[in-house]
Image (cartoon, rainbow, N blue to C red):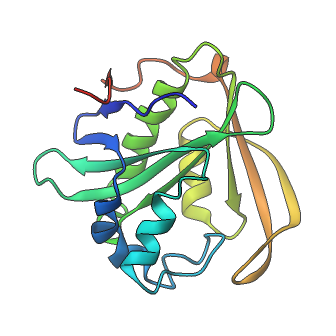
């Protein structure tokens, strides 16, 4: 897996996630209503969340979006290997008090733009709980296409769930949709 660089958007600094970010993410990820569409239930302790966020066996990369003006954490964004070479899956969580403010759209635009800078990345996809209309709507606004519905595909804390698969090919991505600057993690 490639290193996790720092990404800059107009409003956010997307830096590599660190264990201490659990404190800012816990108020969101400890709520049952905010974890309804996750594969696991809400976290009951900040320590458990921190362990999950920095699990050394997880093969993906994680970014924490930090508001450039206030320094407050606004969300977590991830990319991890799909089943085939050149394919990545993405995921996102926006903290509860920033939802509905375009945070996920801005940060996911930056993340997708960054991921497609790797010449080996040909496809990005997201598996989204079929009941999670806000997340599916974001994928659609970003230009992802609904590729299918996997019926009773995943068993989560709420039972069997249908999953929607949204995909985006490199050639479909409209480059230059935002002023994004990618810098190395050391910057």
Q: Residue at the spot x=45%, y=87% of the render?
A: 44
In the rendered structure, the answer to whether residue 57 lies left or right of residue 6 reads right
Q: Residue furthest right?
A: 151
Q: Residue furthest front?
A: 56
State how many labels appear: 0
Q: Is residue 101 above or below residue 181?
A: below
Residue 130 lies, in percent from the top left, at: 73, 65
Q: Is residue 55 above or below residue 48?
A: above
Residue 115 lies, in percent from the top left, at: 53, 27
In which quadrant of the rendered view does residue 38 lie? bottom right
Residue 124 lies, in percent from the top left, at: 66, 34
In the rendered structure, the answer to whether residue 187 lies left or right of residue 76 reads left
111 or 143: nearer the viewer: 111
80 or 96: nearer the viewer: 80
Q: Is residue 52 above or below residue 80?
A: below
Residue 14 lies, in percent from the top left, at: 32, 41
In the rendered structure, the answer to whether residue 112 lies left or right of residue 168 reads left
Q: Residue at the spot x=89%, y=65% of the render?
A: 151
Q: Residue at the spot x=46%, y=49% of the render?
A: 77
Q: Residue furthest top?
A: 119
Q: Residue at the spot x=46%, y=35% of the render?
A: 111
85 or 12: nearer the viewer: 85
Q: Is residue 12 above or below residue 110?
A: below
Indicate the quadrant containing the C terminus: top left, top right, bottom left or bottom right.
Answer: top left
Indicate the quadrant containing the N terminus: top left, top right, bottom left or bottom right.
Answer: top right
């Amino acid at each position: 897996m490639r290193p996790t660089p720092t990404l800059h958007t107009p409003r956010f600094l997307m830096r590599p996630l660190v264990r201490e970010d659990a404190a800012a993410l816990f108020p969101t990820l400890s709520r049952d209503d905010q974890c309804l569409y996750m594969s696991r239930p809400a976290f009951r302790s900040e320590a458990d969340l921190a362990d999950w966020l920095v699990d050394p066996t997880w093969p993906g990369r994680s970014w924490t979006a930090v508001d450039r003006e206030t320094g407050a954490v606004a969300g977590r964004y991830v990319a991890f290997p799909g089943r085939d070479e050149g394919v990545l899956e993405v995921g996102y969580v926006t903290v509860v008090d920033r939802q509905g403010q375009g945070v996920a759209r801005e940060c996911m635009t930056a993340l997708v733009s960054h991921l497609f800078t790797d010449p080996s990345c040909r496809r990005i996809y997201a598996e989204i709980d079929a009941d999670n209309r806000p997340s599916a709507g974001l994928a659609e606004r970003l230009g992802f296409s609904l590729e299918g519905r996997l019926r009773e595909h995943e068993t989560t804390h709420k039972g069997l769930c249908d999953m929607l698969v949204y995909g985006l090919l490199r050639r479909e991505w409209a480059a230059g949709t935002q002023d994004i600057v990618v810098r190395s993690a050391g910057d």
